[in-house]
Image (cartoon, rainbow, N blue to C red):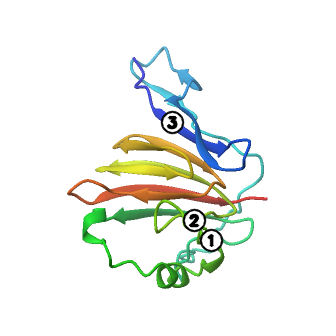
Amino acid sequence: MLQKIRRLVTGHNAEGKSIIVSDAPSPHTLVLSDIPACGMTNLWVTDGQAALDTTGDDNADRRVTLTPPEQGSIFRIVEFPPDKTLAGKIDRKMVFAAMGADAAMDTTGARHPLMHKTKTVDYALVVSGEIYAVMDEGEALMKAGDCLVQRGTNHAWSNRSDKPCLVAFVLLDAK
């Protein structure tokens, strides 16, 4: 039987606040009946074409920034330390400036010091540990194997455990 993959999808409510609009196993599966326990689960699809690069260059050999280039993408792993190790040590302006993302920082007195909003569609997969996806209204605990589709919503990540959490992200520039 094909493993169910939990998929969280963000959106906005009528007031424009970020929320989690869906939290359930993705129903978009193809089970390959000739091969036991083999199949595919689509988590999200966007239209458009990715750039192929056959130059052999290391395209990641550039300044590490929060957002991808215009019409581009980033694939990354983020290690989130436990929140308690950061308590009182976060200089929000410095953090966002270091990522070249001053404009992404939420300056409205958000519920988490690292709340931010980017012009991207992000796919997040918890690789190890656990972390909360924090929205303007609501949050969800994600554990290893859980996926989230972040669609340009104000959000933050909160690791309330005692261990680091690794999250794989694909960020796509969006209109």
Q: Residue 7: horizontal and vertical position, in percent?
A: 51, 36
Which numbered mark, 3 or 1, is in the foreground of this view?
1
Q: Residue 15: horizontal and vertical position, in percent?
A: 72, 47
What element does badge 2 sit on?
Answer: loop
User: Which is nearer the N-term, disc 3 or disc 2?
Assistant: 3
| Image disc number at residue 116 | 2
| Image disc number at residue 56 | none
Quadrant occupied by the N terminus: top left
Q: Dots 1 and 2: beta carbons under 8 Å?
A: yes
Mark 2, Cα crowd under 10 Å, few <14 / some 14-19 / many 20+, is many
What element does badge 3 sit on?
Answer: strand
Residue on which the image places disc 3: 7
Mark 1, Cα crowd under 10 Å, few <14 / some 14-19 / many 20+, is some
Quadrant occupied by the C terminus: bottom right
Q: Identify residue type, mark 2.
A: His
Q: Identify residue type, mark 1.
A: Ala
Q: Nearer the viewer, residue 96 or 37?
A: 96
Residue on which the image places disc 1: 104
Which numbered mark, 3 or 2, is in the foreground of this view?
2
Question: Which residue appears farthest toward the front when viewing the image?
Answer: 109
Classify 27 as above or below 70.
above
| Residue 62 visible, this orientation | no
Q: CA distance from mark 1 to mark 2?
A: 5 Å
Residue visible at 29% across and 54% down in the picture: 160
Q: Identify residue type, mark 3.
A: Arg
Residue visible at 72% across and 45% down in the picture: 46
